[in-house]
Structures are given as structure tokens and as C-alpha cells.
Image (tube, rainbow, N blue to C red):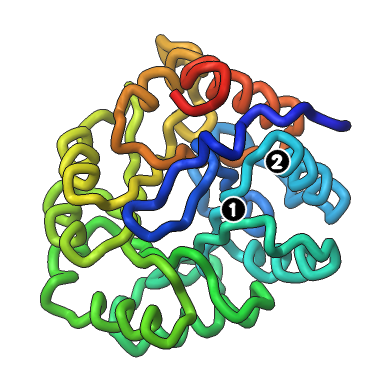
Amino acid sequence: MKQDRLFAEQARREIGRTGIRVSPLGFGTLKFGRNTGVKYPTPFDLPDDDTINELLDACLDMGINLLDTAAAYGTSESRLGEILCKRGDGDAWVLSTKAGEDYDTGESVFDFSPEAIIASAERSLRRLRVDSVACLLLHSDGVAERSFGETGVFDALDDLKTRGLVRAVGASIKTPEGAAIAIPRSDVLMIEYSFASPGMSESIDAAGAAGVGVFLKKVLGSGRVGDGYDMSAADALRFVFEKPAVTSVLIGTLCLEHLVENAERAIAALGNDGGG
């Protein structure tokens, strides 16, 4: 299913001051590898390789180049590594992954020690079959982030940058307190923000003022927008893109039709060239 390129390359946005440019809509891949312990309104089966390839093809055809995954996304990293290796188009993607949370035993286990973060990053590279990734984020549980400034975890991220294993570092943050700690040491933050969950608005503004990139997650309420929420998906996207500090909005789906619809809605929210 061939799609017209919706997001013009010139409309890509720089992640903070890193020189890395991404489409204003990114693709989340949790559903590629994990379907337990998640908060989606309906259950789903993990996709086969053909479905993943079809979704990746559509992303590239539309100009979406940001892929988000995590160590805690089950087999997502490994599946992406195998599939992208077979496709031979790894250079077309900006890969972002996360460390600090694991889900190997069927429940989340958090470890934000510097040693654990470095080990997780190195394992992610092996799973993804790459020498480096564009972004590595701390996968916060919402509690530990309040002490990130005291644990040496950002020193570990800086070490990974120095070694050339990652280009940009930061954290997936859940609280304003965590954001305030992370901003001075980060290139990019991932923040939950939507019309139904606007509490991190000031943190987004603060990140932007500091030259830190911002990835948004759960802007459609984990698939609940339009299903009991008093706002359409189009209006939900328009709401979050009103924030000038936003670098990219991450949305995951296993449905090609939904992917295309969300891309078209994002274009409508941003302007015809996808640049706002």
C-alpha cells in the first residue's frame, strides 16, 4: 500500500541542539514485542514480520523516520534489529531506545544504577544489531527520577556518548520534579502530555527554553481518544502541536489505516508541509 510522502524533509525538527533531525510524527514500537502489562483498552496479538514491514514501509513512504523502542518492550528491540537488518534500510531511521526498566520476567523491574544503564545500553545495541543509536533515554518509574541527580546515572549516559554508542541522551519523565533535574543534563526528554493529561505543560516549555528536545507520548490516551474522551484524535493532535517546544509526537499502532489517518491528522494540525 503505497503512501504519498506527507512529511517533507525540510520540515524535520532538530532534537535539541544535537543536529539530529526527525519527523514531527514518530512511530512507537511497543506493540511489536509486548502485549502484557500494558494499558491499552483492548487486547492485541503481536504482529508477524509482514505486518511490521508493511508499517515500516508506510512510515518511510510518508516521511516518518523516528522509531521508538525500549528494553522494556519485550522483544521489540530484537525484532526491529532482525527486520531492519534484512531490509537493509537502517540508515533511513533515527532509533531511540530506553534503559532502566526491564520486562524479561513478565513484570517491570527497575534499576537505575550507572552499571545497569551501561549494561542495558550495550545489550540494546546487540539486540538492534547496530553500533550506536541516536537516542538513549532513562525509562523512569516516576519515583527514582527525583534522585537522578544524585545517583551518577547521567554520568553513565555521558560515558555512553563519549564512547560513541549514543548521540543524544535524556529521560522519559513523569513528574515536573524529575524534569527539572533532567533538563540540565539532557539532550531530549520524553513526556506524557495530552488534553486529558496536561500537567507537564510547564516542563515542556522549560525543556524548550533550555534547548532540550521534547518527544511526546500518550497524546491519544493510549488509544482511548474518540472512545469516551470528549475530543477527536484530530483535535488531540492539534492541541499538543500547539506547543512550539515539541520535537516529535510518538504514536504506535498495528493498524496501517490508523497509521495513515494519524499522519494525515498530524499534517492538518501542523500545516500542509508538516512543519507547522
Name the residue nearer the viewer: 189 or 108.
189
Name the residue nearer the viewer: 33 or 246.
246
The quadrant of the image that shows the C terminus is: top left
Residue at far front of view? 10
Q: Which mark is residue 67?
A: 1
Evaluate whether residue 30 shows in this view.
Answer: no
Check contact, mark 1 vs mark 2: CB within 8 A. yes
Q: Secondary structure at mark 1?
A: strand
How far apart, in angstroms, are the residues tagged by discs 1 and 2? 9 Å
For disc 2, the marked residue is: 59
Evaluate whether residue 265 shows in this view.
Answer: yes
Residue found at x 34% / y 89% = 115
Disc nearer the start of the sequence (1/2)? 2
Rendered image quadrant of residue 272: top right
Total marks in image = 2
Indicate left or right for 182 with 94 as reference. left
Rendered image quadrant of residue 216: top left
Residue found at x 50% / y 17% = 271
**How busy is the neighbourhood of tag 2: few (under 14 within 10 Å), some, or many (20 plus)?**
many
Q: Secondary structure at mark 2?
A: helix
**How busy is the neighbourhood of tag 1: few (under 14 within 10 Å), some, or many (20 plus)?**
many
Where in the figure is residue 137, as x and y percent of width and height? 38, 64
Indicate left or right for 197 with 49 as reference. left
Where in the figure is residue 256, as x and y percent of width and height? 76, 32
Q: Is residue 160 above or below residue 1?
A: below
Where in the figure is residue 207, as x and y percent of width and height? 22, 47
Kindly identify the amino acid type of the residue bearing the numbered disc 1.
Answer: Leu
Q: Is residue 175 above or below residue 216?
A: below
Residue found at x 39% / y 66% = 168
The quadrant of the image that shows the N terminus is: top right
Kindly identify the amino acid type of the residue bearing the numbered disc 2.
Answer: Cys
